[in-house]
Image (tube, rainbow, N blue to C red):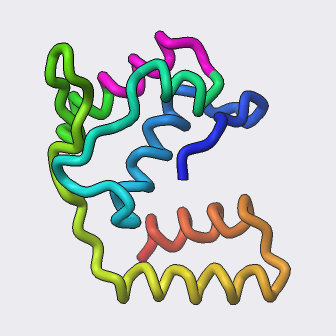
Amino acid sequence: MLRKVDKHSGIPAYIQIENMIKSELLLGHLQKGAQLPTIRELQNIFDVNINTVLKALERLKAEGYIQAEQGVGYFIKKDVDIEQKIIKTIRECVSTLKKDGIDYYTAMLIFEEVWKNG
C-alpha cells in the first residue's frame, strides 16, 4: 500500500518511495504492464516534493522495475515472482516474533545477522 513517507525515519524519502513500490511488486499488488499513478498523484500520496518522486522513479527505472512512456506515464516493466509459500513463511515468522514481543528493529538486526552468517 502506498502511503506518506515517514519524514522522521532517517531513511531518505526517495528510498522509502522506491521500497514501497518494490513492496507492491513483491506482494503481487502491481503486475507487469500496470501503470503507476501520475507523478502529481504520487506526490500527493507520498506528501513529498515532486523531485523526490522523480528521483525514486528514476532509480526504479535504472534497476529495470519500471519504464517510462513519454507523455503517457510510468509502467511496471517486470514481474517479481515470489512464491506464496515464501510470503506465508515470512508472515508466520513475523507473527511469532510479535507474539514473543520482538520489535521491528530487533527483528531486522536478527535477520541481518542470520542473513550474513547463514
Is 21 covered by the magenta stretch? no
The answer to whether residue 56 is visible is: yes
Does 3 sit left or right of 114 as displayed? right
Frontmost residue, 75 versus 23: 75
Quarter of the image for residue 46 reads: top right
Quarter of the image for residue 43 reads: top right
Q: Is residue 14 above or below residue 55?
A: below
Task: Report the quarter where the C terminus lies.
Answer: bottom left
Frontmost residue, 111 versus 98: 98
Residue depicted at x 35% and y 83% = 84
Q: In this view, does 115 lie above or below 93?
A: above
Secondary structure mostly seen in magenta is helix
Residue depicted at x 65% and y 34% = 5
Residue depicted at x 22% and y 37% = 75
Q: Give the range drawn in magenta.
A: 48-58
Residue depicted at x 15% and y 23% = 69
